Image: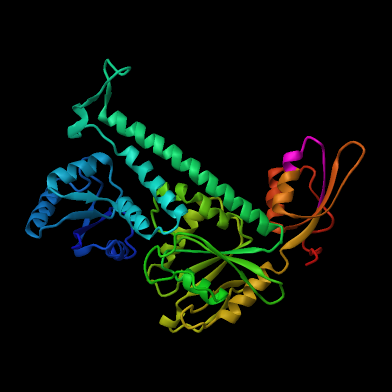
């Protein structure tokens, strides 16, 4: 099957920074399987409401589309439904914006049942907002027994059918999320701390994951090679083991639909005791990539979880692998190469130092009306001892990691939370 011939349009608005001059967008288009003819850079003071570019630029673009037999024009921007429709009419070919391109790549990469459900939900959520009046089939009416009268336009039918499918997908994903939560509760009973790999797409997370865990999880030098999380046991110095989780890569301007659809997958990030923020140390725009990851972590509520910066791919730089400290002696980052294995001993030691004292022993006395809290404790902690008095109150002694303890106390506004001793001085027995 011949590849689609595409033109790329990279737009920079007044006052914006352009960290990579559209190179990331070029890689996205190439990863979608298209034949990229050219990347056109356009500067504008502000977007045009009807076409984003303005009449003159649209006419220039239309001439190139005709001259080069272009199949699709890809915009490195999020277009409104009206802008997309007007551009398609003016250019005489399909127009796809940045969000549509990312969704297409996700659809190509999804391999598991859950991944396919998540991508379809994101696609339909987006499609429902882009059903606009003006389609040629809208004059057709749906009628019949019990449906006489004004009838239902095809637009309304499409919206209703898409809405029903979205509800069905959410129901199926809820079952998947419940199954994943059951697996997570089983892991928490161990209890083993979880460390999650997060970072920009193609930063080398899966390669590092495979190297650390000696596994064969899919990894490739391409954007969004990993959509489905993987969890493996990892032995580190000073602990029995930890659980290491590999997760989907992030991206600048990641579509909201995708963040919502992959929320169940990203729960592995929310439940971690430590995040390893893997950064491509050789990327010229690594600061912008790090900021994009920080934004997504904040959106999913994981910005308060302790983080360790891992500068990967240092084999492409002159930097020597190893730990990086700030002036006060605090560890800032670890330089590694997942390709050569350089810096891995330092990374393992840093992980052991960060999670080695993460468990504390605490106790709570709960009234009979606090059954939900008691059930929550059994899910998120390892209950060591539980007894009941004559009034039906439960006295629970449990081991819990310090992050989960802080979250529990915040949820209760510190009411009734009493640790056996200071969390930093009473490690739980392994």
Q: Where the N terminus falls, by quadrant?
A: bottom left
| Residue 372 falls inside the magenta stretch | yes
Q: Where the C terminus falls, by quadrant?
A: bottom right
Say above or below: 240 vs 188: below
Which residue is at 48% across, 79% downward? 337
Left or right for 137, reference 267? left
| Residue 189 falls inside the magenta stretch | no
- Pick whichever, 131 or 108, lies toward us: 108
* Residue at the top extreme of this rendering: 149
Q: Can residue 58 be seen in this snapshot?
A: yes
Q: Residue 151 at what x, y percent from top left? A: 27, 20
Which residue is at 54% across, 69% downward? 309
Say above or below: 200 vs 369: below
Give the colouring mode of the picture. Answer: rainbow
Q: Residue 70 at what x, y percent from top left? A: 14, 57
Left or right for 70, reference 410? left
Say above or below: 146 vs 322: above
Which residue is at 66% across, 54% downward? 185
- Pick whichever, 104 or 172, lies toward us: 172
Left or right for 122, reference 181? left
Q: Can residue 409 be seen in this snapshot?
A: no
- Pick whichever, 126 or 49, lies toward us: 126
Q: Residue 40 at what x, y percent from top left? A: 19, 60
Left or right for 196, reference 369? left
* Magenta stretch bounds: 363-373
* Residue at the front extreme of this rendering: 145
Q: Residue 33 at what x, y percent from top left? A: 26, 63
Say above or below: 368 vs 110: above
The image quarter containing residue 223 is bottom left
Q: How many marks?
A: 0
């Amino acid at each position: 099957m011949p590849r689609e011939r595409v033109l790329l349009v990279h737009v920079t608005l007044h006052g914006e920074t352009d960290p990579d001059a559209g190179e990331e967008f070029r890689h996205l288009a190439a990863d979608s399987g298209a034949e990229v003819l050219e990347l056109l850079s356009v500067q504008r003071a502000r977007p045009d409401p009807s076409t984003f570019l303005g009449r003159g630029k649209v006419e220039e673009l239309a001439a190139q589309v005709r001259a080069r037999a272009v199949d699709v024009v890809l915009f490195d921007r999020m277009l409104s439904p009206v802008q997309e429709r007007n551009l398609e009419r003016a250019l005489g070919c399909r127009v796809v914006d940045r969000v549509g391109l990312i969704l297409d790549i996700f659809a190509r990469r999804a391999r598991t049942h859950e991944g396919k459900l998540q991508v379809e939900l994101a696609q339909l959520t987006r499609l429902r907002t882009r059903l606009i009046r003006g389609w040629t089939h809208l004059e057709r009416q749906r009628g019949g027994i019990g449906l006489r009268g004004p009838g239902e336009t095809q637009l309304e039918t499409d919206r209703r059918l898409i809405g029903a499918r979205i509800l069905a997908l959410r129901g199926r994903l809820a079952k998947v999320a419940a199954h994943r939560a059951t697996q997570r509760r089983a892991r928490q009973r161990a209890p083993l701390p979880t460390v999650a790999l997060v970072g920009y797409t193609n930063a080398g997370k899966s390669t590092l994951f495979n190297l650390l865990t000696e596994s064969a999880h899919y990894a490739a030098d391409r954007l969004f090679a990993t959509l489905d999380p993987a969890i493996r046991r990892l032995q580190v110095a000073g602990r029995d083991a930890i659980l290491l989780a590999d997760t989907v890569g992030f991206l600048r301007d990641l579509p909201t639909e995708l963040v919502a659809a992959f929320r169940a997958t990203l729960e592995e990030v929310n439940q971690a005791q430590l995040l390893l923020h893997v950064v491509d140390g050789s990327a010229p725009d690594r600061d912008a990539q790090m900021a994009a990851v920080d934004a997504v972590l904040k959106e999913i509520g994981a910005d308060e979880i302790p983080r360790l910066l891992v500068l990967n791919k240092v084999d492409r730089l002159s930097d020597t692998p190893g730990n990086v400290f700030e002036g006060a002696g605090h560890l800032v980052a670890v330089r590694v190469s997942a390709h050569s294995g350089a810096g891995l001993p330092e990374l393992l030691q840093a992980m052991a130092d960060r999670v080695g004292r993460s468990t504390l022993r605490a106790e709570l006395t709960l009234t009979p009306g606090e059954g939900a809290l008691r059930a929550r404790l059994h899910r998120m902690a390892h209950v060591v001892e539980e007894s009941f008095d004559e009034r039906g109150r439960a006295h629970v002694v449990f081991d819990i990691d310090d992050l989960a303890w802080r979250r529990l106390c915040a949820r209760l506004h510190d009411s009734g939370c009493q640790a056996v001793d200071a969390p930093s001085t009473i490690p739980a027995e392994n």
